Image (cartoon, rainbow, N blue to C red):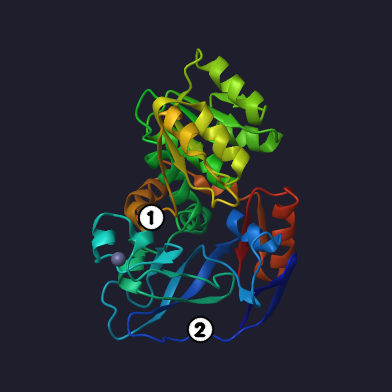
Amino acid sequence: MRGAVLYGPRDVRFEERDVPRITKPTDAILRISAACVCGSDLWPYRGIQPIAQPTPMGHEYCGIVEEVGSAVTSVKPGQFVIGSFFASDNTCPHCRFDYQSSCQQRELVSGAQAPQLRVPLADGTLVATSATPSNDLLPSLLTLSDVMGTGWFAADAANVKPGFTVLAVGDGAVGLLGVLSAQQMGAKRIIAMSRNESRQKLAREFGATDIVTERGEEGVARIKELTNGIGADSVLECVGTQESMMQAISSTRPGGHVGYVGVPHGVELDGQELFLAHVHLHGGPAPVRRYLPDLIDLVWNKKINPGKVFDLTLPLDQVAEGYRAMDERRAIKTLLRP
Ligand SMILES: [Zn+2]
């Protein structure tokens, strides 16, 4: 089979790879229905997070189960399934506290930008839908594997409650779906920070009530202005840079919450500044598995349409263009069809 392999900065190749096989009795092999490029794939793609060797790419996936190992009992061949980017057993103490992305047995799923994929710990990781979905649901179901679950976790970690004022820092797919999540959780006012017209438009469609184009200290001043000098109740940090993190913390009211899901790159927090900010900080790799059943219901019943973040769909063999379009911000997110 052929799949995406990253060789170095801006060098993604579509090339022959080994067909995945069951290696442990707890594995499953999927036939991928749709995969995509993640904002976090851009860190190694840009060389900011160097890779040691050619690396099969892709960790967002949904598809049909082709084969299961002898110990797998919860999913069977023929079912349509979605799983998290971290495989988890869903039984260890961390999983029982609903932090499946900190599972004692966690394994990063990789190589999903391909026709077939091996998923470890299939029983704990995969959730089957009640039937095979129609094609129009595929993009939204695919988002539940990472990007939508991550946006939802950002809002959940930021303690979004009905009536709250929420701020989303970052207008990538996660930030936009954080807006959608906040709207679903009943936020009254949702401020999105974006300078890009098509992203602003999508943010509004997802429920944003205000758009702020300023950044850094100016951005913080603008948020304060919009909130009568108080700051937002809940702030979703969906970028992972020093500037975005400080923007998030400084825009939060004392006692408010920051949910941070942008993978931090070079972020350093000053203890005293944090002490005086009086904010709750909670984040990390989203425990997507926690939200899968509920989010599948919301998509299945057409209550949400997170698949709108895909503004570029390409056949899998054009994966390199999918990366380029996102890197150059010509696309918000690329969906790949094997
Ligand atoms: Zn676990």
Whether 297 is drawn above or below 180: the answer is: below
Q: Type of residue at label 1?
A: Pro
The reply to whether residue 161 is in sight is: yes
Task: Please name which of the two marks, 1 or 2, marks the residue nearer to the observer.
Answer: 1
Q: Position of residue 81 (x, y in %)?
A: 40, 66
In three-dimensional space, the C-alpha distance between marks 1 and 2, rounded to whole angstroms, equals 25 Å
Residue placed under numbered mark 1 in the picture? 287
Residue at image point 33% right, 80% down: 26
Q: Position of residue 220 (x, y in %)?
A: 59, 25
Q: Position of residue 247 (x, y in %)?
A: 57, 33
Horizontal side of 296 relative to 11 (left or right) equals left
SS for dot 2 = loop
Residue placed under numbered mark 2 in the picture? 20
Quarter of the image for the N terminus: give it. bottom right
Tell me: is circle 1 under 8 Å from ligand 1: no
Q: Residue furthest front?
A: 272
Q: Tell me which corner region of the image, top left, top right, bottom left or bottom right, holds residue 119.
A: bottom left
Whether 304 is drawn above or below 34: the answer is: above
| Quadrant of ligand 1 in image | bottom left
How packed mark 2 is, by other alpha carbons closer than 10 Å (few <14, some 14-19, many 20 or more), is some
Q: Type of residue at label 2?
A: Pro
